[in-house]
Amino acid sequence: MFIRRQFLIFKTTAMALTLFTLAMSVDLAPVIAQDDVEFSRSSLAIETSDGTHAFDVEVAATDRQRARGLMFRTEMAPDAGMIFLYRQDRVLTMWMANTYLPLDMLFIAADGRIVHIAEETIPLSRATISSRRRARAVLELNAGTVKRLNIHVGDRVVF
């Protein structure tokens, strides 16, 4: 009886270690199904030296919405985007894992001024994209929008 119990403990422990090793070798980042996260919509404008440009954006204001972002999307209208809102100013970082669309990212200070722009981000990349300065929000637009509309650091986002 004692030997059988020890064998069962050994077998259970070995199985647990095998499962743990397997789990550690798989990317365990949470993936939220596209239909599981809903976003509200809003309008915003970017004021540049060339004029004011209007966008219809989805708002990512919760941790769950920010984690989901534009992942798994394959298209976005030319005048659309997503704005990620944060409660406090800080250096913000993003990445493109599971994001199929190339994007322009505008990092925005609490006063609405653009403090950094990352153009033509690479889809599916895990490279970190940083605001480099303290920011309160990130606006993601289709890649090429910054160049097309002549958007620069210092321009204002009105939201």
Image: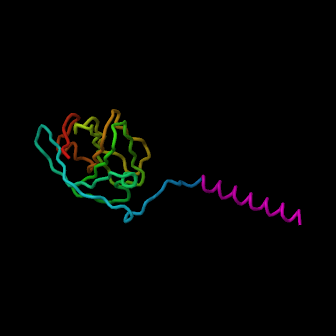
The residue at the point 36 percent across, 52 percent down is 62
The percent position of residue 11, horizontal first and vertical second, equals 77, 61
Q: Position of residue 103 (x, y in %)?
A: 30, 48
Using the rendered view, name the quadrant where residue 100 is placed: bottom left
Pick whichever, 65 or 97, lies toward us.
65
Q: Is residue 96 left or right of residue 157?
A: right
| Image x and y of residue 142, in percent | 26, 51
Name the residue: 69% across, 58% down.
16
Q: Indicate whether 154 appears above or below 79.
A: above
Residue 12 image-quadrant placement: bottom right
| Image quarter (top left, top right, bottom left or bottom right) of the N terminus | bottom right
Residue positioned most to the front: 87
> Total number of numbered labels?
0
Residue at 28% x, 53% y is: 59
Chief SS of the magenta region: helix
In the rendered image, which quarter is residue 137 located in?
Answer: top left
**Left or right: 52 in relation to 27:** left
What stretch of residues is rendered in magenta?
1-24
Give above or below for 34 relative to 53: below
- The answer to if 60 sits in the magenta stretch is no
Camera-side residue: 113 or 145? 113
Q: Is residue 10 magenta?
A: yes
| Horizontal side, residue 19 vs residue 95: left or right | right
- Camera-side residue of 102 and 15: 15
Front residue of this view, candidates 131 and 123:
131
Where's residue 114, x and y in %? 24, 37
Coloring scheme used? rainbow
